[in-house]
């Protein structure tokens, strides 16, 4: 877990979100770092998530009147100071003694959205109580379908009772990716860190294949989510359901047709299957297919406010960040998360101002220097 104490404050040298990574690495042991930093296979998808943003150039506009601009947004009836939400990350006590409670505190203090993982190391109720203590920012609950549908339903009911505002149904990780870095260090949860919202015996039930069967097809995938499960979830909860982990336009359209309130375009940070396309590269086709019917969110690779601008230009209503806020949590605690959110908002607002826009809805592909949408209108 921890091999160095938390920093007393934010070092002067941390001027950008990515600066937290080195401080987090020094604080975490090899076990925790392999889980946080590793990805599937040769980690190509993880690298492509960054290069997708890096190769997109912006086209600025000069002498624009941008007084009074802002990057506030509204999602599913709740107002946010910026289009940045904290993605679900499992077992956060690996990175900070207070785990998800610390993250919820920081998010609520800034009014940011926070998505709690099914595999959280703090309970649904503990996180809600901490969020209310700090200002009661909007919380969403991320659901991994359980082998026992009754347990899945119980998790949803607990989230509803604790005033979570949405259910994020993650569908792209029915099994863990083949993460070689975790294998090389023999990753395991240390004492005192577990899935606080699950009974271990229930979570593991039904995962073993029959004699002679495939460990994948007859074991792990036997309880993988299907379209029938999405229909069941939509009928089970009164909360908006956002389907997370979509890269194919047909899957996005089918989810919306069934009643999904939103889509998260995501390759799971490159953690499930390697050589998937970058989330940003998959976004335009899904944007065209959905045609504004529901909000589209994007994760994987966000490190700058200009990255957020580019995602919005290609059709995203908001973005999720994962590793960046965990780096800050590991290094400094809740103050670090608040700093990350503030840095990204400041960078996004500066990018908007220099590109001549005052509202998120004004950002389009016309603001990307060499994007086909701009060239076709030139």
Image: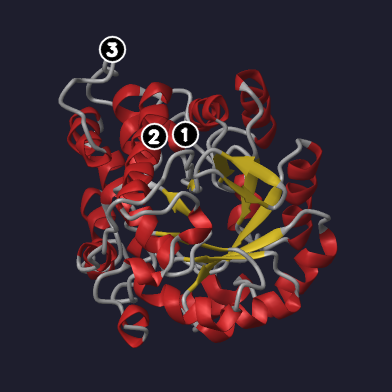
- Dot 3 falls on a residue whose secondary structure is loop
Front residue of 272/82: it is 82
Q: Residue at x 61, y 63 (%)?
A: 295
Residue 25 is at least partly visible in this image: yes
Which residue is drawn at the image coordinates 70% and 68% (left, top)? Answer: 260
The label on residue 306 is none
Q: Quadrant of the N terminus?
A: top left
SS at mark 2 in the image: helix
Residue 345 x %, y %: 40, 39
Dot 1 or dot 3, earlier in sequence: 3
C-alpha span from label 1 to label 2: 7 Å
Q: Position of residue 143 (x, y in %)?
A: 63, 55
The colour scheme used here is secondary structure
- Image check: 150 left or right of 316? right
Q: Which mark is residue 94?
A: 2
Q: On screen, 230 above or below 328?
A: below
The mark closer to the camera, 1 or 2, is 2
Count of numbered badges drawn on the protein: 3
User: Mark 3 and mark 1 in contact (Cβ < 8 Å)?
Assistant: no
- The C terminus: image quadrant: bottom left
Q: Is residue 190 visible?
A: no
Q: CA distance from mark 2 to mark 3?
A: 19 Å
Name the spot of residue 39 as percent of width and height, x first: 29, 60
Q: Earlier in the sequence, mark 1 or mark 2?
A: 2
- Residue extending farthest to the top is 8
Separation (CA) of disc 1 from disc 3: 24 Å
Q: Which residue is mark 3?
A: 8
Can you say whether 122 is above or below 113 in the image? above
> How would you rate the neighbour count of disc 1 (Cα within 10 Å): few for under 14, some for 14-19, many for 20 or more?
some
Residue highlighted by disc 1: 193
Q: Is residue 345 shown left or right of residue 234?
A: left
Q: In percent of the image, x 64 and y 42: which residue is there?
A: 79
């Amino acid at each position: 877990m921890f091999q160095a104490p938390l920093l007393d404050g934010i070092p002067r040298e941390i001027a950008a979100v990515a600066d937290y990574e080195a401080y987090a690495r020094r604080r975490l042991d090899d076990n925790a770092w392999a889980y946080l930093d590793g990805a599937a296979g040769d980690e190509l998808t993880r690298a492509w998530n960054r290069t997708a943003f890096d190769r997109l150039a912006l086209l600025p506009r000069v002498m624009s009147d941008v007084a009074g601009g802002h990057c506030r947004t509204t999602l599913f009836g709740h107002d946010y100071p910026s289009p940045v939400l904290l993605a679900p990350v499992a077992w956060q006590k690996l990175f900070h003694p207070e785990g998800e409670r610390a993250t919820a505190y920081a998010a609520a203090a800034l009014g940011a959205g926070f998505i709690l993982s099914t595999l959280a190391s703090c309970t649904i109720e503990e996180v809600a109580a901490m969020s209310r203590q700090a200002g009661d920012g909007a919380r969403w609950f991320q659901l991994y379908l359980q082998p026992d549908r009754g347990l899945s339903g119980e998790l949803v009911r607990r989230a509803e009772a604790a005033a979570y505002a949405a259910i994020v149904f993650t569908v792209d990780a029915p099994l863990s990716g083949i993460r070689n870095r975790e294998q090389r260090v023999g990753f395991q949860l240390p004492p005192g860190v577990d899935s606080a919202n699950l009974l271990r015996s229930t979570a593991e039930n039904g995962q073993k294949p029959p004699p002679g069967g495939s460990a994948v097809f007859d074991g792990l995938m036997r309880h993988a989510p299907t379209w029938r499960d999405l229909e069941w979830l939509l009928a089970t909860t009164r909360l908006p359901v956002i389907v997370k982990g979509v890269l194919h336009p047909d899957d996005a359209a089918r989810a919306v047709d069934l009643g999904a309130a939103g889509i998260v375009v995501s390759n799971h940070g490159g953690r499930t299957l390697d050589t998937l396309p970058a989330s940003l590269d998959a976004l335009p086709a899904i944007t065209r297919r959905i045609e504004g019917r529901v909000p589209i969110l994007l994760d994987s690779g966000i490190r700058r406010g200009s990255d957020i601008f580019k995602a919005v230009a290609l059709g995203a209503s908001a973005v999720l960040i994962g590793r960046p806020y965990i780096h800050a949590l590991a290094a400094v605690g809740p103050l670090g998360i608040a700093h990350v959110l503030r840095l990204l908002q400041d960078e996004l607002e500066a990018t908007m101002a220099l590109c001549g826009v005052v509202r998120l809805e004004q950002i389009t592909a016309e603001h990307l220097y060499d994007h086909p949408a701009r060239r076709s209108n030139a």
